[in-house]
């Protein structure tokens, strides 16, 4: 039972929105942890206290290492092995000679207090890493910050042991409210995880995000102004499936969410009843059927997909396992993870997209450094061809988990023409032959398809379609390359909706030729599920979509508002337009 604090009984607060990281529902009081690196003021210690500060440092390091070892042991078997090994990165930082020497030098040479020295070192590293335009390096700064905070927490705990009055009253179970998503704040010093997490910052691929998904801790990040709007002890409802946080909600709203949470727990969490809107295939207003599959990048998302009754995992992004370590994942760890994916898919087909990264990520075993134009460099299958052992390992892992009972497919990213598909098939054949010689399970026939995201692939049409077993259209990337417009640039967002006439013509041609030859074609991407673009895609003749589980409800609602016949008429005219402005004049009322 959650105690109603005075803050929780206050006037209903705001409804905050952010980015879902790990789905689920959490209800509890807010506990803020936003102060560690900001509240410690520079302090000096007398010369005769320097040795005492150094001893405190090494005791706290030892306590932190013990906690991480215990936490890793507790997580073993509950999360994938590679995810548990994330904690090894933190242990390594505890022994990092640069970190240790920098802290010790500040204590020895400047007579800084231990707390002030740790804060300065972590802040300096953080500032340096953030100047680098590389998300992986930034996440490493977060890892180092986590280690520093863990050491500080252990110093605080020792102070509280000696001085009980220093122990602030904290809730036993709480929703963590923080500036950044970090591993150290996901668990208390006894390694019990929190009810839910909401933060102002934190990437979807960070180590903390990966563990939050594995531990199924409902998590929402990217909430602007969070720390200005949530106070200690506020009552929070975290709907991490929708990316919504309700602050001090009204009693009737709380009751509804408590009832939903009770139903979820009674049904075994992920096995709760399917929502009423989850009826598939999705139907347009005039009765056309759309095949809907999920686009996932983690095991919890696959579970959500199965619970919604979707027709399989149409796109499984395989990048996370390659980003959590500085070396490529082992074959055994790949097999274990992919087997978990197909097992949780419950017999529904799964399409694994091969590793899709470029040199903007710090994947050192694939790239020596950042290229001048990463998006047009060794991206996707180009990088894998350049590092064939990495590609062969991934192909072999997929072969090992395929069977008649669990069909799998392989999607090849950043394809230029049919030669890319042909080469992947040749390598797949070689790996199958090698497994057969070893007497190992070699899987059943695996379909190999192309991810259409380059103009060359979109325009090569007949040859690519004939060589591929299926096509997956990445609408975001395809538009980006066709229009030479960066989709992450907010000033250029209007370029992506509605779909440009040039792209529409290409899509209509792909859909028509795929139907003639009898090859499946599906679409995925953020811009593919917006109401206007969805109607245009249906008008192009596309009838299969891959959608993230968290976006599924709005997708189904949008499909129901589309008249397929009218969409065909408008799309036919829009594809002949000379510019996007002409398309805008044609689509008015298309999604009413």
Image (cartoon, rainbow, N blue to C red):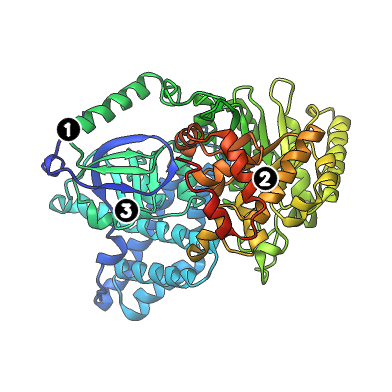
Residue that carries the numbered disc 1 in the rendered image: 251
Q: Residues within 10 Å of mark 1 (few under 14, many from 20)?
A: few
Residue 462 position within the rendered picture, expressed as x and y whole percent measured from the top left? 83, 44
Q: Quadrant of residue 543?
A: top right
Instruction: Report the disc number at residue 178.
Output: 3
Nearer the camera: disc 2 or disc 3:
2
Q: Can residue 82 be seen from the camera position used here?
A: yes
Task: Measure how far apart labels 2 and 3 are at the Cα level.
Answer: 38 Å
Counting labels gives 3
Residue drawn at 53 percent across, 43 percent down: 529
Question: Relative to 184, is 336 on the left or the right?
Answer: right
User: Which quadrant of the structure image shows residue 326?
Assistant: bottom right
- Residue lying at 73% horizontally and 61% vertically, measured from the top left: 378
Residue denoted by label 2? 473
First in residue order: circle 2 vs circle 3: 3
Q: Secondary structure at mark 1?
A: helix
> If you read the primary sequence from the N terminus, does the residue marked by circle 1 or circle 2 appear first?
1
């Amino acid at each position: 039972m959650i105690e109603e604090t005075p803050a929780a009984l206050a006037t209903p607060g705001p409804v905050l929105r952010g980015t879902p990281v790990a789905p689920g529902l959490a209800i509890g009081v807010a506990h803020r942890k936003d102060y560690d690196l900001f509240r410690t003021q520079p302090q000096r210690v007398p010369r005769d206290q320097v040795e005492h500060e150094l001893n405190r440092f090494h005791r706290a390091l030892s306590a932190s290492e013990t906690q991480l070892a215990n936490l890793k042991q507790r997580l073993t078997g509950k999360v994938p092995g590679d995810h548990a090994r994330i904690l090894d990165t933190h242990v390594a930082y505890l022994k990092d000679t640069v970190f240790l020497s920098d802290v010790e030098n500040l204590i020895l040479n400047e007579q800084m207090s231990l707390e002030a020295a740790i804060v300065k070192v972590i802040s300096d590293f953080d500032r340096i890493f953030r100047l680098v335009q590389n998300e992986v390096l930034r996440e490493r700064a977060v890892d180092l910050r986590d280690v520093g905070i863990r050491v500080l927490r252990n110093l605080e705990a020792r102070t509280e042991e000696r001085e009980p009055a220093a122990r602030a009253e904290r809730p036993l179970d709480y929703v963590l409210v923080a500036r950044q998503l970090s591993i150290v704040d996901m668990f208390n010093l006894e390694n019990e995880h929190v009810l839910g997490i909401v933060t102002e910052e934190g990437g979807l691929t960070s180590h903390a995000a990966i563990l939050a998904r594995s531990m199924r801790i409902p998590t929402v990040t990217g909430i602007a102004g969070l720390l200005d709007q949530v106070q200690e002890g506020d009552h929070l409802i975290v709907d991490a499936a929708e990316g919504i946080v309700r602050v001090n909600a009204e009693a009737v709203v709380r009751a509804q969410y408590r009832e939903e949470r009770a139903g979820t727990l009674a049904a075994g969490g992920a096995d709760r009843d399917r929502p009423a809107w989850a009826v598939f295939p999705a139907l347009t207003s005039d009765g056309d059927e759309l095949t809907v599959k999920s686009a996932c990048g983690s095991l919890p998302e696959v579970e959500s997909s199965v619970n919604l009754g979707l027709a399989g995992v149409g796109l499984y992004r395989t990048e996370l396992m390659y980003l959590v370590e500085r070396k490529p994942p082992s074959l055994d760890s790949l097999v274990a993870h992919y087997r978990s994916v197909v097992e949780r898919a419950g017999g529904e087909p799964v399409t694994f997209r091969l590793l899709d990264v470029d040199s903007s990520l710090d994947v050192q075993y694939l790239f020596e450094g950042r290229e001048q134009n990463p998006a047009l460099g060794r991206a996707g299958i180009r990088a894998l061809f350049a590092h064939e052992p990495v590609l062969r390992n991934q192909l072999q892992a997929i072969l090992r988990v395929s069977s008649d009972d669990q069909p799998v497919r392989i999607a090849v990213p950043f394809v230029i023409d049919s030669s890319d598909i042909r080469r992947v098939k040749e390598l797949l054949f070689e790996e199958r032959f090698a497994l057969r010689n070893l007497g190992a399970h070699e899987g059943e026939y695996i379909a190999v398809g192309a991810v259409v995201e380059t103009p060359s692939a979109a325009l090569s049409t007949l040859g690519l379609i004939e060589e591929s077993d299926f096509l997956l259209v990445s609408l975001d990337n395809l538009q980006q390359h066709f229009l030479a417009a960066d989709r992450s640039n907010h000033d250029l967002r209007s370029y992506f909706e509605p779909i440009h006439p040039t792209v529409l013509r290409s899509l209509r041609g792909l859909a028509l030729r795929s139907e003639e030859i009898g090859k499946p074609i599906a679409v995925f991407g953020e811009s593919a599920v917006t109401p206007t673009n969805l109607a245009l895609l249906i008008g192009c003749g596309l009838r299969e979509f891959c959608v993230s589980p968290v976006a599924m409800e709005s997708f189904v609602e949008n499909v129901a508002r589309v008249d397929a016949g009218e969409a065909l008429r408008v799309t036919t005219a829009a594809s002949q337009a000379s510019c996007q402005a002409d398309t805008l004049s044609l689509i008015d009322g298309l999604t009413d």
